[in-house]
Image (cartoon, rainbow, N blue to C red):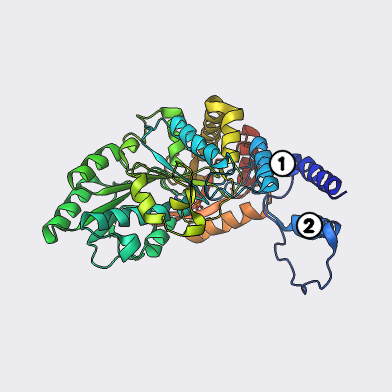
């Protein structure tokens, strides 16, 4: 009986997926009222009724084709199904020994390395997202810095470790990670950027490193590079940065959350050339790979240092598996079978299917940018370099930009987010949903032309 309810509820929910095209992209009334905790329950059907009438109408259409805020993926059908399997089978992928789930997570990490043409020296762990992958990046870099002066930070703390973080345009989540890891959100050294770009200026990095070493020869530098900044879609020159890092024995962490997908189009010698020299890499699957939230990946060539960072001894956690258990190379002990939707996506769509979808998003972004370039009322704030379009009302003030964005989002047809470029307010449209088509761009263009 219980199962029948579940099946019909799931079937009903699935049949709604097609409506994602038509429902408002932003929920018109998103405040759910407080009511007292039920003393006696309303049962499964009580929840279903509440969800259908009171909760679902208040949710956004973020899984649909015209939600262009942040960098938002849509859950593809195979991954959606796989994620339901993960929930219903509820494996705990903390360590192996009782299930093949760990083994499949390892295989999926290998597939991701193959997908992105990274050497098989990269190993890693699934995380809740790029934020937690960046936290691991900060923690393992800290552990490395400690090792250089004979300090095991995981055991003995950060006291006496001489290190400095250098970066040009770290993502906000990376800054947050630096706070968590004890470097301090405000304590990283800002490297200059190239002009009209968020990418790091190499000469500035070199002079900062030189100065750092002159001041304190023992200081271990940590360089945080970006492979795809979230606003400008700018890429640091990883190939050159990696060489510089080797020279200064600096740790190189690359935040490639969504930018790594450019490799599917341009190969390993495109904008991410040199990524293979990174010590660690952050990437997101719930963005451009279109698996459900939440799913990120942390990769590193130094799995032993990661293990030293994360492992703790406890008798009840003893492990007979020959492989390192995931709880010893990640933040959580108990872990969801997060790899399965990624495995399912790679198995069902293959390299070609995933690449096709990336190309489609890039084409849609170009289509949108071309319309803006030719439009009467809008202008591009920057050329569209990949899947993100930055624009504003032509000759408009910051306030004009904010007003236009508000009206665009109030239309319920398309959702975009604000940003800043070269000191000016801009509107940002990011394309990363597998459902988005040229027709969706046309719908957005109609909304914009009414505001010209
Ligand atoms: C989105 C993003 C993050 C943060 O990712 P979450 O998955 O939201 O935690 C980090 N870095 C970059 C470059 C991003 O685009």
Question: Residue 156's mark?
Answer: none
In the image, residue 322 lies at what x, y percent?
45, 41
- Which residue does the image show at 78% across and 57% down from the upper left? 51
Circles 1 and 2: CB atoms closer than 8 Å = no
Q: Is residue 390 left or right of residue 54?
A: left
Q: Nearer the viewer, residue 56 or 249?
A: 249
How far, Cα to Cα, is label 1 from label 2? 20 Å
Q: Provide the secondary structure element on which disc 1 rests.
A: helix
Residue identifier under label 1: 21
Residue identifier under label 2: 51
Q: Provide the secondary structure element on which disc 2 rests.
A: helix
Q: Nearer the viewer, residue 39 or 313?
A: 313
- Which is nearer the N-term, disc 1 or disc 2? 1
Q: Is residue 385 something one can see in this rendering?
A: no
Q: Is residue 436 left or right of residue 36?
A: left
- Which residue does the image show at 79% across and 40% down from the upper left? 15
In the image, residue 331 lies at what x, y percent?
47, 56
Q: Is residue 254 left or right of residue 145?
A: right
Residue occupying the far left of the picture: 214
In the image, residue 325 lies at what x, y percent?
47, 47
Q: Is residue 98 something one can see in this rendering?
A: yes
Task: Name the image quarter holding residue 310.
Answer: bottom left
- Which residue does the image show at 38% across and 42% down from the upper left? 227
In the image, residue 345 lies at what x, y percent?
59, 34
Q: Nearer the viewer, residue 356 or 24?
A: 356
């Amino acid at each position: 009986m219980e199962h029948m309810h579940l099946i019909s509820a799931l079937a009903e929910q699935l049949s709604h997926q097609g409506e994602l095209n038509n429902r408002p992209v932003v929920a018109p009334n998103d405040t759910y009222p407080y009511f007292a905790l039920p003393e006696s329950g309303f049962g499964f059907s009580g929840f279903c009724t509440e969800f259908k009438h009171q909760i679902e109408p208040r949710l956004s259409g973020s899984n649909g084709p015209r939600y262009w805020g942040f960098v938002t993926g849509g859950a593809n059908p195979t991954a959606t199904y796989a994620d339901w399997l993960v929930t219903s089978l509820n494996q705990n992928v903390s360590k192996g020994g009782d299930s093949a789930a760990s083994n499949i997570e390892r295989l999926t990490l290998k597939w991701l390395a193959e997908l992105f043409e990274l050497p098989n020296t990269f190993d890693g762990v699934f995380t809740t997202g790029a934020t937690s992958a960046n936290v691991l990046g900060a923690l393992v870099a800290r552990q490395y810095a400690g090792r250089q002066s004979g300090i095991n930070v995981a055991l003995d703390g950060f006291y006496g470790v001489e290190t400095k973080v250098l970066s040009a345009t770290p993502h906000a989540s990376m800054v947050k990670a630096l706070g968590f890891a004890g470097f301090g959100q405000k304590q990283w050294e800002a490297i200059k950027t190239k002009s009209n770009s968020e990418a790091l200026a190499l000469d500035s990095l070199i002079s900062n490193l030189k100065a750092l070493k002159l001041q304190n020869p023992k200081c271990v530098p940590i360089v945080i590079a970006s492979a795809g900044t979230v606003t400008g879609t700018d890429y640091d020159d990883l190939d050159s940065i990696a060489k510089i890092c080797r020279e200064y024995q600096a740790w190189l962490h690359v935040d490639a959350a969504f930018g790594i997908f450019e490799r599917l189009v341009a190969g390993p010698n495109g904008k991410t050339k040199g990524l293979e020299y990174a010590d660690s890499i952050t990437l997101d699957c719930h963005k451009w790979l279109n698996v459900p939230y939440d799913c990120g990946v942390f990769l590193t060539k130094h799995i032993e240092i990661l293990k030293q960072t994360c492992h703790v001894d406890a008798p009840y956690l003893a492990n007979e598996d020959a492989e390192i258990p995931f709880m010893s190379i990640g933040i959580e002990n108990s872990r969801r079978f997060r790899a399965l939707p990624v495995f399912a996506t790679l198995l069902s769509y293959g390299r070609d299917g995933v690449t096709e979808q990336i190309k489609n998003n890039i084409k849609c972004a170009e289509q949108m940018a071309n319309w803006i370039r030719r439009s009467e009322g809008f202008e591009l704030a920057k050329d569209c370099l990949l899947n993100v379009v930055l624009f504003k009302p032509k000759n408009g003030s910051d306030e004009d930009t904010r007003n236009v964005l508000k009206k665009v989002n109030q239309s319920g047809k398309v959702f975009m987010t604000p940003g800043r470029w070269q000191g000016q307010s801009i509107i940002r449209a990011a394309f990363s949903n597998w459902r988005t088509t040229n027709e969706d761009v046309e719908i957005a263009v109609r909304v914009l032309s009414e505001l010209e």
